Image: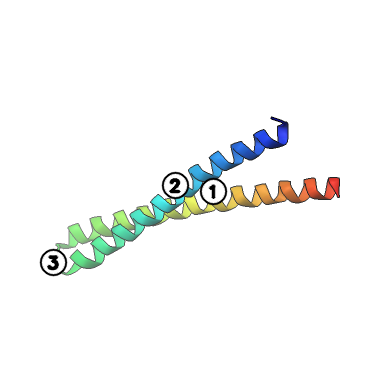
Amino acid sequence: MNQTDQSQIKWCELCRHLSVKFATGARLYAEAVALLAANAPTKSWSEYKRLLHAAEEARRGSEAAGIAFEEHLSSHHETVQRSTRATG
């Protein structure tokens, strides 16, 4: 297997890992918001604030995972474009 094939395999593994982190983060955020919305009217103020904090933390985690995934894809596409120009 040559160098290009090896880097493509590593990219696929990293891409898969980052996409799973992003999808999981988005799911956790959606679940936290649903829990907050469903329970807000029946909870005490302190419990509402705890649920709100959990939803905000999940949002930040989802955003961070999304940014990492997007940056990785962007760097991969830039590498492909550079190698296309070099061989083109």
User: Could you tell me which residue is drawn at 83 percent across and 50 percent down?
Assistant: 85
Which residue occupies 57% across, 53% down?
70
Residue 36 x/y as whole percent:
25, 63
Answer yes or no: is residue 24 visible. Answer: yes
Compare residues 47 and 69 and report the one nearer the observer.
Answer: 69
Dot 1 crowding, Cα within 10 Å, few <14, some 14–19, many 20+:
some
Label 3 secondary element: helix
Query: Which residue position is annotated with label 1?
Result: 68
Q: Quadrant of residue 38?
A: bottom left
Q: Give the SS element for disc 2.
A: helix
Three-letter amino acid code at the position of disc 3: Thr
Where does label 3 land, which residue?
Answer: 42
Please state which of the two labelled residues, at mark 2 or mark 3, is closer to the viewer.
Answer: 2
**Residue count near mark 2 (Cα–Cα under 10 Å), binned few <14, some 14–19, many ≥20:** some
- Looking at marks 1 and 3 on the same chain, the residue that comes earlier in the sequence is marked by 3
Q: From this view, report whether residue 7 is shown above or below residue 70.
A: above
Residue at image point 34% right, 54% down: 28
Return the residue at label 2.
21
The CA distance from mark 2 to mark 3 is: 32 Å
